[in-house]
Amino acid sequence: MERPYEQIRRMVKLFEYNRLKLRFRNEDERARFIDGWAERFCETDDAEWNIAVTIMTARRREPNFYNMEKALREAQGIRRERVFDKERKEMQNGEVSSWAGHKTKANTG
């Protein structure tokens, strides 16, 4: 993940804005939370992270490691599906255009 601390800070603000359960007694506790999440999820792909944060927010899941890891697994599936759909469309477009070109050559020959 690029700039994990910034990503986590944005996530915390989003969760707080949407009234998800984040209760910090003070700024030190907030900083420890951000540090812990940044360390835990720093290797996460940015696209998958964004999808997982959206899932957590939309479903109003309690912000904890278990729920985020569950949302990340779901995000990975969603991302794989999108990549698969994109590749399938590219293949179909490639086959259609080459088939159209083949028909044109046959008609001119």
Image (cartoon, grey):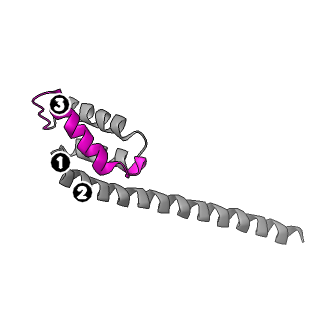
- Residue beneath the point at 66% across and 67% down: 95
Q: Residues within 10 Å of mark 2 (few under 14, many from 20)?
A: few
Residue located at (66% from left, 63% from top): 94
Is label 2 in a helix, a strand or a loop? Answer: helix
Instruction: Give the left or right position of residue 53, taking residue 83 as reference.
Output: left
Amino acid at dot 3: Asp
Dot 2 corresponds to which residue?
70
Question: Where does the image place residue 16, in percent across and percent down from the top left?
Answer: 20, 31
Q: Is residue 44 above or below residue 54?
A: below
Q: Which quarter of the rendered picture does the C terminus lie within?
A: bottom right
Whether residue 52 is visible to the viewer of this picture, yes or no, is no
Location of mark 1 (residue): 64
Q: CA distance from mark 3 to mark 2?
A: 27 Å
Which region of the structure is painted magenta? 21-48
Which comes sooner in the sequence, label 3 or label 2? 3
Marks 3 and 1, Cα distance to the nearest angstrom?
18 Å
Tell me the element at label 1. loop
Give the amino acid type for the residue marked by disc 2 in the picture.
Lys
* Residue 29 on image: x %, y %: 15, 34
- What residue is rendered at 55% in x and 62% in y? 87
Residue 40 visible in this rendered orientation of the protein: yes
Among the 4 quarters of the image, the one containing residue 36: top left
Residue underneath mark 3: 28
Of marks 3 and 1, which one's residue comes earlier in the chain? Answer: 3
Mark 3 or 1: in front is 3
User: 32 or 109, which lies in front?
Assistant: 32
Q: Is residue 43 left or right of residue 11?
A: right
- Residue 39 percent across, percent down from the top left: 30, 47
